[in-house]
Amino acid sequence: MKFYLLLLKMFYSFLFFLNFITIYLSDNVLTQEWMKSNDVVYYGPKYVTEGQTFEIMCQMSKFKAPRWTKNELPTGESKRFSYTNKIGIEMTRIEVINVSNASAQDSGYYRCNSFSRSYHQISVITSEPIPNTEETSTTADILFNEIKEDYTTITLKCPLLYDTTQDTEFFWYKNNINIVNDERRTVEKTQLIIRNATSAVDAGDYMCRAETISQLGGSQFGQIIQLRAPIRIKPFTRSQNVMLGRPFTLQCNYTGYPVGKIHWLIGNEKISSIKLSELGIEIKPNTDSHPDAVLVVRNATQLHTNSYTCVVNNRFSEDERSVIITVRDRPVNGQSPLILAENRELILGCNYTDSEGRPVIISWKWSKDGINYEDFDEEDKKRMKIDERDHSLIISKGNKVDIGNWRCTNPSDEQQFLIIIVRAKPYLYPFEEFQKTNYKSANIIEGQKFELKCEIISDYNRDAGVMWYKYNENEHDHLNKEMQSIGKSERIQIKEFNVTSSLLTISKVIPSDRFYYVCIADNGVTTFNNTILLRVKDKLGALWPFLGIVAEVVILCTIIFIYEKRRIKPDFDDSDDNTEPKATQDRTSSKSQDVRQRK
């Protein structure tokens, strides 16, 4: 009996552990894959200007054989290519390839070991046009295709160098990332089909891999297919006013593939290095290290009043955008725009300087959105006062009614004025659908509908609008997240009720929809956002704990049945051995009686 109870205790302990693991797995806690070992590490630049020299280093195990390839083809011997190596640390070696006088043909994916799936991408920036943009010759190491219009279907065929057998499985990669079949992208035999393709999301370098299933087979990589997209520069503000002596910055942002070369025009002329030095203009890379993307002027003068044009060319397409910069020598200046913090002090001030640059005290006339200070409500005036020293307007406790365009005007000359923009953060209503989850995440079962409504609170929607973005879960802790715009499709829709309110709808959620979804409200001065993580659960996720309990009951009943059967069987055997026939017992009894009678 004690053995039976001990066995039950051990079994229930095992069932408790099994049930815990089942629930743990069903809750999508272990949804992330194990990190794959990275046997080769690369170091080197990402962008290279044509004509420059670049160097790529790779660190690998000293037991691996080095072999440099570009787009899966050997780099070979050339006067422009040189190779060196040295001993690394912890049983590693460092291989170096040096390429001089870089050209467009040097763009691609470099490997120092053909068995490694990691590689280093180099983009050579050049504006020389390609003779034929429709070229698809198989003799080139790169093939070309183009997204001519967004939301169309693109079909890519795997361009293998050698024939394959029928027992071959195909895998596709975009920019070194494996493509998983989803609603938009599917692999069908040797083809990759991309539905609702957009230049911002789908342009890039594609490569296929053929994996032979038979034991004698192996892997074969196809040629690179460059899915190109025309250059589209994000427009500047049409015109900008800059105060004399103040700095200003122009940044040229664009979409398109391959990477384009940026150059700037002042008026209609290209700016030389000498003219840049004379005007005090600096051209430098942006945060992504793209050359010549940012134009900086640290001290604006009247010479900087002109039209500035950004031109981007990626060898098969070109685009340009212009902005007019006007440098004004206005005598009235002040800090604008200002961000309103509720229940805190807000100071609006205007400064006037005469022709000799000396400050002059002016008794400013104040107004907001065309309403003079004298006509304000008495309750508002209690929070405000005009400083007698410089006639600035001081608001002791700012609130939402102070949002607007304030104006200080010189009473003696109404042409001398300054508009001070005051805005608060464009606060959003929380996502109503997920209040119980503290708005941090949403757990949706695969195939269900997912909706998010984004709306700015009415008192804070001055000059504001909402936009939808998403970013990968592994970038949540990064400062510079790669925000992706959410494109519309048959399954994903964005319904805009007005500028300040919209509804994001995913009709049927699939596992690839697992992202952080961000609604950003922007009023041109400051921003505010609501962010939520969409967790996609398996359809059968809730069934696993139940199946675990059923398995527990079946195993328990089986153990009890086997134990009882083995315990009862020996008892029956003992009883059979000790039992005698009734006739034998009767004869024995009669004999004993006869013996007693004879005595």
Image: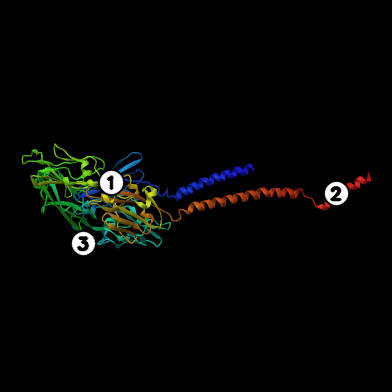
User: In the rendered view, does 314 fall on the left or right side of 473?
Assistant: left
- For the residues marked 2 and 1, what is the alpha-carbon distance in whole angstroms? 104 Å
Q: In the rendering, at what x and y percent does residue 186 appear?
A: 36, 60
- For the residues marked 3 and 1, what is the alpha-carbon distance in whole angstroms? 38 Å
Q: Residues within 10 Å of mark 2 (few under 14, many from 20)?
A: few
Name which residue lies at 17% across and 55% down.
320
Q: Secondary structure at mark 3?
A: loop
Q: In the rendering, at what x and y percent does residue 133 appear?
A: 22, 61
Which numbered disc, 2 or 1, marks the residue closer to the eye? 1
User: In the rendered view, does 565 fall on the left or right side of 64?
Assistant: right
Work out whether residue 351 or residue 296 is closer to the camera in this orientation and state it. Answer: 351
Instruction: Name the disc covering residue 298, or none.
Output: none
Work out whether residue 571 or residue 192 is closer to the camera in this orientation and state it. Answer: 571
**Residue at mark 1:** 480
Q: Residues within 10 Å of mark 1 (few under 14, many from 20)?
A: few
**Which residue type carries mark 2?**
Thr
- For the residues marked 3 and 2, what is the alpha-carbon distance in whole angstroms? 120 Å
Colour mapping: rainbow
